[in-house]
Image: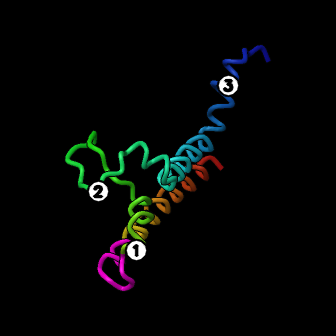
Amino acid sequence: MGATHWQTMKRVILPTASSGITASIILAMGRAIGETMAVVLVMGNVEMIPKSILNPAEALTSVILLEMGEASVGGTHYQALFAVGIILFIIVMILNIISMKLGGRKK
């Protein structure tokens, strides 16, 4: 009723869609963590503990992918790779829970 398109978007559409937009951003972060190739290319894929946030590192998924063939079944290395998988699962699960909480807030 006399509002411009920008006023309608700012006062009606964006407040209504904000929980869905926030949930989609969080889910996209979870998906990006799981996308091995993109993360490997960005991080540099070196096997060392980074001393700074700007140093190259290795993604959790690429650790599992590249080292599973070398690990002996039941050994310490094998168990460590499964621990890395559990950590990755927990990170994605936390992001999904946050997404569900923020997505359900406006309902």
For this view, does 97 lie left or right of residue 58? Answer: right
Say which residue appears at 36% left-offset and 81% top-offset: 72
For this view, does 51 lie left or right of residue 94? Answer: left
Q: Secondary structure at mark 3?
A: helix
Question: Callout 3: 10 Å neighbours few (<14), some, many (20+)?
Answer: some
Say which residue appears at 35% left-offset and 45% top-offset: 44
Image coloring type: rainbow
Q: Given the image, on which type of amino acid does mark 3 rest? A: Met
Q: Secondary structure at mark 1?
A: helix
Q: How far is the residue under mark 3 from the one under mark 1?
A: 47 Å
Q: Secondary structure at mark 2?
A: loop
For this view, does 64 lie left or right of residue 96? Answer: left
Q: Given the image, on which type of amino acid does mark 2 rest? A: Glu
Image position, residue 28 (x, y; %)? 55, 47
Q: Which mark is residue 47?
A: 2
Question: Is residue 75 located in the magenta-colored stretch of the structure?
Answer: yes
In the rendered structure, which segment of residues is drawn in magenta?
71-82
Would you name the residue on which mark 1 appears? 82
Say which residue appears at 41% left-offset and 63% top-offset: 66
Q: How far is the residue under mark 2 from the one under mark 1?
A: 17 Å
